[in-house]
Amino acid sequence: MHEAELQMKSDLLEKAERTLHGIVRHTPILHSSLADGLFFKAENLQLTGSFKVRPAYNQMAALSSQERRRGIVTSSSGNFAQGAAFAAGRLGASIKIVMMRSCNPLKVERTRKLGGEVVFCPDRFEARRETVARIARDEGRTVVHPYDHPLAVAGNGTIAREILGQVPEVEHIAVPISGGGLIGGIAWAAKLQKPSMKIWGVQPSGSNATFLSFRSGQRQAIERAETIADGLKVTQPGEITFPLIQRYVDEIVTVGEDTILKAVGDLLWEEHLVVEPSGAVTLAAVQEGKIPVEKTVCVLSGGNIAPEVLRRVSGK
């Protein structure tokens, strides 16, 4: 068994549930009006507008008081930045968040409003990592990872526990994929409780590193991610998350940009839900016929939609 899997074989999930109780929202399961038997797990209604507050708070709550006093540094494309800023504020720690200059300006603004100090870097994931390492070295800050950490994975796993408590009859869960922390946690937690569950991962066709890795059986990197789903642009799955994906995820599919935008619009106009493209990819996969409809829960991972995307789907 891979070392990364061994790290997830403890009581981390139960500890995460206790840590997050009373901190995060127990988000609703909604029946879809678009298809019979289809449900939505509305993490777009989570605090800070995405699921990311779960992995952020679960990691930071485990830090020692000395580590919190030294401050925290992390990196993000936007949603983890907001979750991390919220968590640091609740725990009384200062935080610096490294973001690429091309990040969604709305997410940058909200991160700052939550008390996070944004440090920009060039538009390369290597630059993100290098900047985080430099700040940690120069300032003695504690590094918190946006997805590739056991406590991040366990925080995300609490979503699966909620889903199974809300819809016990569910047979399929569809999950967006970026670095793999969300699907790794959901797949691991869901299969522990209900081994017959089918877990489907979804990536944009222009940001398909995990799709390619899953097909080849080893981690692969892509040179650049091109997609409107700005939260799904990680160019290589994580060292901890990928073995979990290999073991617990049943299938990974990709979806096109036009379908993603259509799904955002359908969620807005038909379901009255504001969901960003990164969160709408699961519905897009259903609409492309790549994921079953009956007894399926689509995880809507976030609702921090850029104004220009909202204008595109609203026709204004």
Image: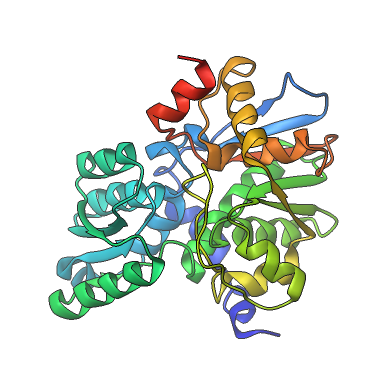
Residue 155 visible in the shown view: yes
- The image shows residue 88 at horizontal and vertical percentages of 26, 54
Quadrant that contains the C terminus: top left
Residue placed most toward the observer, 87 or 288: 288
- The image shows residue 281 at horizontal and vertical percentages of 63, 41
Name above or below for residue 186 compared with residue 151: above
Question: Which residue is rendered at x = 55% and y = 61% of the image?
Answer: 181
Residue placed most toward the observer, 85 or 242: 242
The color scheme shown is: rainbow
Name above or below for residue 232 compared with residue 140: above
Quick check: 91 left or right of 195? left
Quick check: 18 left or right of 163? left
Name above or below for residue 200 compared with residue 302: below
Residue 105 found in image quarter: top left
Residue 29 visible in the shown view: no
- The image shows residue 142 at horizontal and vertical percentages of 26, 72
